Image: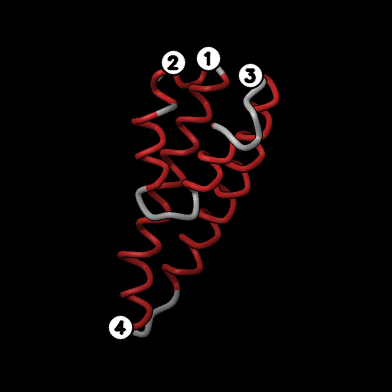
Amino acid sequence: MKKYISTSVGFLRLIAFLEGVSFLILLFIAMPVKYVLGNDALVKTVGQAHGLLFVLLIVITLFVGYEKQWKLTGITFKVLASSIIPFGTFYVDYKILRKL
């Protein structure tokens, strides 16, 4: 866990993981509960957490991209685009971020 907090790329990986998990919980647990059972409490709670993590991921990605001098159309774009695709953050972490 210390390696994820001690470096900027590690922190980006941690936030990307949390954002990806919150997105999957929102899509595959909270939304079905809302539309099948009619209870939207989980969507409100998980949705707020996901929204905060999403914005945090964008800010940290831009910060790390600037710090590491990534091109905006390169790694930075891939990390940002992965945040709107289910399982995207896990793929980008496996293919790109863990190697940094």
Determine contact: label 1, label 2, CB under 8 Å: yes
Residue 50 lies, with reference to residue 80, above or below; the image says below
| Residue, disc 4 | 37
The residue to which callout 3 is attached is 68
Q: Quadrant of residue 58?
A: top right
Disc 3 to disc 4: CB gap under 8 Å: no
| Label 2 to label 3: alpha-carbon separation | 20 Å
Quick one: label 4, few (<14), some, or many (20+) residues within 10 Å? few
Count neighbours of disc 2 (C-alpha within 10 A) and say few if under 14, some if 14 to 19, many if 20 or more: few
Q: Residue 70's x, y, as percent?
A: 62, 25
Q: Is residue 38 left or right of residue 44?
A: left
Residue, x 57% and y 56% (percent of image)?
A: 51
> Which is closer to the viewer, label 1 or label 3?
3
Task: Estimate the x, y position of residue 77 in percent, counting from the top left.
Answer: 58, 40
Looking at the rendered structure, the secondary structure element under dot 2 is helix
Residue marked by disc 1: 6
Q: Which residue was labeled with disc 2?
A: 2
Kind of residue at disc 4:
Leu
For the point 56% across and 49% down, which residue is it?
A: 54
87 over 7 or under it: above or below: below
In the image, 67 versus 17, the foreground residue is 67
Query: Which of labels 1 and 4 is toward the front?
Result: 1
Label 3 to label 4: alpha-carbon separation: 46 Å
C-alpha distance separating marks 1 and 2: 6 Å
Label 2, label 4: how far apart the Cα atoms are: 40 Å
Give the mark nearest the N terminus, 1 or 3: 1
Residue at the spot 29% in from the left edge and 83% down from the top edge: 36
Q: In this view of the protein, which residue sits in the foreground, 58 or 42?
A: 58
In the depicted view, which residue is nearer to us: 69 or 40?
69
Q: Position of residue 91 (x, y in %)?
A: 35, 39
Q: Which secondary structure, mark 3?
A: loop
